[in-house]
């Protein structure tokens, strides 16, 4: 597959070398965002759709005749340009747009631009190419970034088995084994999307945001419940409707260890803590059946923890 792409690039490059220095090309670009409202430090993704209306195949490669870039122009609410955090650009080398062809690119915008400051931003994408007389620009999109409203918070210690810096008690090279226990902060924050209130889990310490999870939308009449157990795991019981509840368990790295859906019966699902050992169980209600009791629109599944990111 890689060999065929290289051969096609070479053929297209050969054609370009006999063409005039610039092509009267036309590239149509459409930009859309995965959402309009975000919480601070959340990853933001853009979808860029490019259509080649030039009548020529356009290849993006390393050769100077094939060099091109997909870039963004972002302004804050004061119309001040947002500077890039890196010289890197979204990778499109190896892309070939045949005449009339349309291709889609998903770009993690926050990997390249610092959008950590709350506010409103205008985002526009554009493409350049050595054979274009000009750059081609997309429509404008607007996003809102909010600090969110803090609903619930708890600081927990990092369990010894999850702390790589912790030394074993039998380490004779360290006379003082009373090493300070590391901590993490579980924050439940909310933002509004129109009339809907959206719940987020933010895991952080005083230097780093380790994970941000969009855990659901306020729908039920019952109040959500949050608690931490003896292994510093966060348990969340979130009403999805007057009768359906989502139950989540997250570790301190933000990995989802459990997700179950319960329904109300003659009893209401609730979190119960064992005072003797600090463990938590879900009591009341019963497990709901997907497709019978509820339709599952949540994409959250047990996963690996995200790579920690330091806020700029």
Image (cartoon, grey):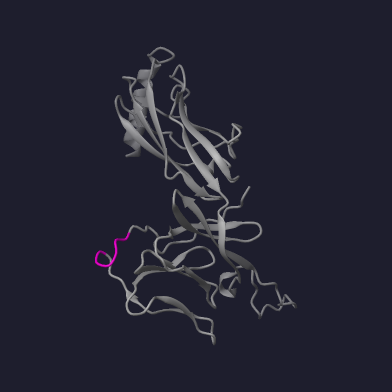
- Residue 87 screen position, x and y as percent: 57, 36
Q: Relative to 115, is 16 above or below?
A: above
Q: In the rendered image of this protein, does residue 31 appear above or below residue 65?
A: below
State whether residue 43 appears in this view. Answer: no
In this picture, residue 6 sits left or right of residue 110: left
In this picture, residue 92 sits left or right of residue 8: right
Q: Residue at x 33, y 57 (%)?
A: 297
- Residue 242: x, y in percent? 36, 67
Q: Nearer the viewer, residue 2 or 257?
A: 257
In the rendered image, the quadrant that contains the N terminus is top left
Q: Quadrant of residue 262?
A: bottom left
Q: In this rendered view, identify the residue nearer to me: 21 or 160.
A: 160
Residue drawn at the location 36% of the way across and 79% of the way down: 267
Q: How many marks?
A: 0
Extent of the magenta region: 291-296
Residue 102 placement: quadrant: top left
In front of the other: 229 or 22? 229
Q: Residue furthest left?
A: 292
Instruction: Tell me if residue 176 is in the magenta stretch.
Output: no
Identify whether 17 is placed above or below 137: above
Which residue appears farthest toward the bottom when viewing the image? 276
Q: Extreme right residue here?
A: 175
State the image coordinates of residue 86 (x, y, percent, origin top left): 58, 39
Instruction: Give the residue at x 61% y 52%.
Output: 310
Q: Is residue 10 left or right of residue 177?
A: left
Question: Which one is in front, 282 or 3?
Answer: 282
In x, y percent, where is residue 224? 46, 67
Q: Is residue 254 visible?
A: yes
Dominant SS type (magenta)? loop
Q: Residue furthest top?
A: 20
> Is 190 located above or below residue 256 in the figure?
above
């Amino acid at each position: 597959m890689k060999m065929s792409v290289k051969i096609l690039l070479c053929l297209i490059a050969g054609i370009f070398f006999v063409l005039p220095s610039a092509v009267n090309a036309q590239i149509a670009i459409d930009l859309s965002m995965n959402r309009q409202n975000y919480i601070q430090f959340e990853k933001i993704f853009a979808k860029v759709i490019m259509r080649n209306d030039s009548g020529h195949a356009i290849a993006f490669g390393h050769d100077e005749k094939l060099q091109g870039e997909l870039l963004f122009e972002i302004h804050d609410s004061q119309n001040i340009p947002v500077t890039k955090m890196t010289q890197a650009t979204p990778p499109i080398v190896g892309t070939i747009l045949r005449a009339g062809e349309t291709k889609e690119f998903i770009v993690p915008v926050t990997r390249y631009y610092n959008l950590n400051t709350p506010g409103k931003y205008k985002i526009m994408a554009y493409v350049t190419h050595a054979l274009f007389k000009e750059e081609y620009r997309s429509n404008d999109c607007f996003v809102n970034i909010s600090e969110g409203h803090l609903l619930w918070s708890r600081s927990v210690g990092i369990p010894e088995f999850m702390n790589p810096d912790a030394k074993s008690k039998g380490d004779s090279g360290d006379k003082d084994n009373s090493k300070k226990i590391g901590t993490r902060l579980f924050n439940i924050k909310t933002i509004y999307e129109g009339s809907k209130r959206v719940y987020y889990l933010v895991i952080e310490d005083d230097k780093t945001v380790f994970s941000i999870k969009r855990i659901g939308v306020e729908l039920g009449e019952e109040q959500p419940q949050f608690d931490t157990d003896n292994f510093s795991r966060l348990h969340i019981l979130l009403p999805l409707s007057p009768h359906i509840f989502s139950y989540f368990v997250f570790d301190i790295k933000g990995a989802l260890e459990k997700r179950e859906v319960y329904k109300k019966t003659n009893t209401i699902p609730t979190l119960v803590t064992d005072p003797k050992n600090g463990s938590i169980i879900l009591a009341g209600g019963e497990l709901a059946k997907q497709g019978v009791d509820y339709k599952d629109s949540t994409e959250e599944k047990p996963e690996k923890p995200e790579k920690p990111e330091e806020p700029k």
